[in-house]
Amino acid sequence: MSILETIRFVVGAAFMIAGVLFFIVEIFGVFHLDYVLSRMHAAAMGDTLGISMCLIGLIIFSGLNFTSLKMAFIIVFLWCASPVSSHLIARLEVTTNEKLSENCEVEENEPV
């Protein structure tokens, strides 16, 4: 095993371990936070960062090829789709929860 392969392995493994650590923090947030919006935020951020880090590690392991390009496109798609879906779920919670002011500070907006 050459020195470049060793460096590539260490960097790829570091990204994979960082991704797993983000997943562990996400699991802690989902199960220990009290309010649904806090849990949803922890899950959305943990998924986006954890999957991205793991995929970057896999790209480094794979090298430069067509599979790496597909994994990079998956990262771009997740970075675009995950915040949008999280925002829609949070907005649904805000509009349907009648007891929102018990858990959050709510500003009353005048209808336009």
Image (cartoon, rainbow, N blue to C red):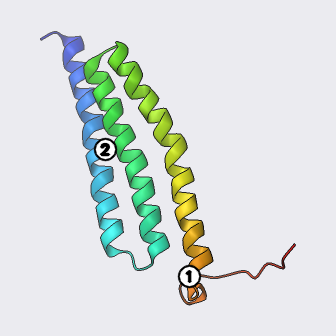
Judging from the image, what secondary structure is the residue with disc 1 in?
loop
Residue at (35, 67) in percent of width and height: 29
The amino acid type found where label 2 is placed reads Gly
Q: Residue furthest right?
A: 112
Quarter holding the N terminus is top left
Question: Could you tell me which residue is drawn at 54 percent across and 73 percent down?
Answer: 93
Report which residue position mark 2 lands on. 19
Mark 1–mark 2 Cα distance, whole angstroms, equals 33 Å
Mark 1 or mark 2, which has the lower sequence index? 2
Q: Name the residue under label 1.
A: 97
Q: Where is residue 52 in the image (x, y as percent from the top left)?
A: 39, 39
Q: In which quarter of the image is the C terminus?
A: bottom right
Residue at image coords 84%, 79%: 110
Mark 1 neighbour density, 10 Å: few (under 14) some (14–19) many (20 or more): few
Q: What residue type is labelled 1?
A: Asn
Q: Residue 11 location, x and y as percent?
A: 28, 28
Nearer the observer: mark 1 or 2; the answer is 1
Q: Where on the picture, by quarter, is residue 108?
A: bottom right
**Residue 48 x/y as whole percent:** 42, 47
Q: In which quarter of the image is residue 64?
A: top left
